[in-house]
Amino acid sequence: MLDQGSSRAKTGSPGGVARAARRHLQEIDGIHGCSIFLRTGGESWIEAARVGTAPLADPGPVLQATEPDSGGTVRPRGEAEEQDGWLATYACVGPEVELVLIAGFKPIDPGPLQARLEKLEAKAGWLLVAALRERSQQKGDIAQGLEMGGAILQEAPSARNRLQLAHQWIARLERAFQPGLVAVCRVPVATPSLLALSGGAVVDRNSAQRTALEALAAAAMELRAVRIHVAEAGQDTDPDTAQLDDALERLGAGACMLLPLYDGDNCRSVVIVLWNDAITPLPDMAAAELIGSILESAMSIQQRAHPSLLRRAGTWLADTAAALFGRRGLKLKVALLVAVLVLVAASQIPSSVAPAFNATVEARDRRIVSAPFDGFVAEAPFELGDTVPAGDVIVAMEDTDLRLELAQAQAEQARLETEIQAARADRDTARLRELAAQLEQVDVRVELLEYQREQTRQVVDTETVVIGGDAWERVGGRVRLGEPLLEVAEPGSFAVRARIDEGWVADLPDGASGQLLLSAFPETPIPVRLERVTSQSSMEEGVNVFTSWMTLEDGGGEVALRDGMRGIVRVDAGESTLLAEYTRGLRRWFSTRLWALQ
C-alpha cells in the first residue's frame, strides 16, 4: 500500500487529480512513491499530485525527454549491482491537458512488475479524466469568481464600514459556494480578531469556535497565500497542516478555503470559508486566488469611498503640505501667509471688550396723580417733561360746586343740632335718637367734603418731573374720581434699563462700568454702572435677552434726561485680545456643538 501522508502537504491543493490518485493508485502494490504532472497549452509542467515519497528529486530532465503521446517506459533505478527498484513513466494527452505519471516501484521481479505496469497504465486514463474534469471545473470556478467579483466590486462603495463590507462578502460567498460557514476576521495590528459570521451570529462572546476561527486566520497569515485544505486527521506530520486539521476538527468542518487579504505588505483581513465535509466540490486554486484578489480590490475601494478619520486627516495634511510648499498658486500662498500673520498679530494685540446693547431711560420711582373727586380740572400748569419745584401746585380742581355743597351740609348740620337741643328740652327720646342718627350722617358728609376741598389743590412735597399723563390738555374738562391725570417721578430716580444678550450675562459682573449714548445726545456719553441683571427675559430679533438695570453716575450730569429716551449702552467686560474679541461668538458656538456631540 502507498504512504499517502504527504500528498496534500506537498501540493497545497486537494484537487480532483490528487483525490483520484489516492483512490486509484493505492490499489497497486509495490509503489513507494508517485508524482503526477500536468501541462496545459504548452506551459510549464505543474505537479498536480504526489502520493508517497517523490520518485525523483529532480524530475525536470525526465519531463523534458518525455513526449506526450509516447506511452510508457520503465527502467531500473540505481546501478546494476545496487538496483533499488524500478522507475516507470507513462504519458498521455487529452483535450487541452497533457499528463505525465512518474512512479517508483520497490525491487520486484519483472513478471509481477509487468502486471503492476498494466494496472498503472489503466489507472493513467482515470487520472487523465480527473485532470480534464478539474480543468473544466477550474474554468467554471473562474467564471463564477468573475461574476461574483463584479457584484462584490459594485457593492463595495456602498459599505460605510468594514463590518458592512464583511457582510457583503459573506452573502456573495454563500450564494456562490453553499458553504457551511463563512467568517471574516480583521487584523487591526498583528493578531486576527473575528469580525463577522454568516447567519448574523454573535461574535463578541469568546468561545472555542471563535478561538478555532482565529487560529485558522493566524495560520493563513503565516502561509501568506491562499490555501484550500481538506482535513484528514492523523495522516499529516507537517506542523502547518496539523494546525489546520486541529482547527477544522474543533469546528466540525471537513474542508476550508483561507483567503488572506493584504494592503501592501500588511494583512488587513482573512476570509474563512468552511465546508462540512470534503465530498462537496471545492473551488480551484486559481479561482480561489482570483477571489482573493477581488476581495482585496473591494477592500481598497471601500477604504477610498469611506476613509477613516485618521486617513482623511493624513490625506488633508499631505495635500496641504503639497499646496503650501509647491510652486503652484504663488499669489494665493502669499495671501494665506499674510492672513496667518494678521491672525497671529491679532492674537497678541490687547483689546478692551465692551459689548453694546439697546437701552432705555426709565424712572424707577413713579407716582400717579389722580382726580380726588368727580369734577372739573381748573389748573394743570405743567406739561410732559417739565420739572415741578417743591411746594408748587401740580393739579387744581374746580371747587365752586364743592364749596356750595359743603355750605349746604354745614347748614344742615347746624339745623340738626338746634332740633336736638329742642328734643332734649322736650325730653322726646325717640325724636332725639332719630335726630342724632341724621346728624351723624351729616357729620360724615361734612368731613368728606372738607377732605375733598383740601385735595382740590395738589402740591408736590419735593422736586418732581412730569413723565406722563395729559392733565394740561384736560383743563376745564370733567373727570371722575380716581381717574389718572399725571405721572410724575423724582429726578434722581432715573435709571437705564438695558436688554443684555444671553451670551454675555455670565461675563458681565455686577458693578461693571459702562457708557450710555442716547439718540437725543449723540455727542455726550453718560457714565453708567451695572446694578444687576434680572431674571426677566424676552426675545428681540431672534435673540434671547435679559432685562438689567444700570445706575447713572452723577445723575446723568448736565444732560436733561426724559423718561423713555433710547440709546446704546456699552459695558466694560474686561481685557482680551483683538482676535479673541472678534472670534468669541464662533468659539462659543463651536464649544457648544462639541459638547453636544459628546
Image (cartoon, rainbow, N blue to C red):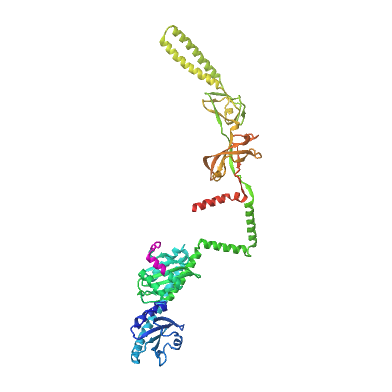
The image quarter containing residue 227 is bottom left
Q: 93 left or right of 543?
A: left
Evaluate whether residue 449 shows in this view.
yes
Location of residue 55 in the rendering, given as x and y in whole percent from the top left corner: 41, 85
Most extreme residue toward the bottom, as rendered? 80
Quadrant of the rendered structure where residue 432 is? top left
Where does the image place residue 293, in percent across and percent down from the top left? 47, 72
73 within the magenta span: no
Would residue 357 appear left or right of 270 to someone viewing this image?
right
- Residue 191 quadrant: bottom left
Q: Where's residue 169, x and y in %?
A: 43, 67
Quadrant assignment for the N terminus? bottom left
Residue shown at 41%/8% (left/top)?
428
- Image height of 277 relative to 460, above or below: below
Q: Is residue 589 above or below residue 58?
A: above
For the magenta stretch, what is the residue range? 200-215
407 shown above or below 17: above
Q: Is residue 95 visible?
A: no
Q: Position of residue 94 (x, y in %)?
A: 40, 84
| Front one among 241 and 158 | 241
Q: How many marks?
A: 0
Residue 214 on the magenta span:
yes
Q: Residue furthest top?
A: 426
Q: Is residue 402 above or below residue 205?
A: above
Furthest residue in direction front, as rendered: 81
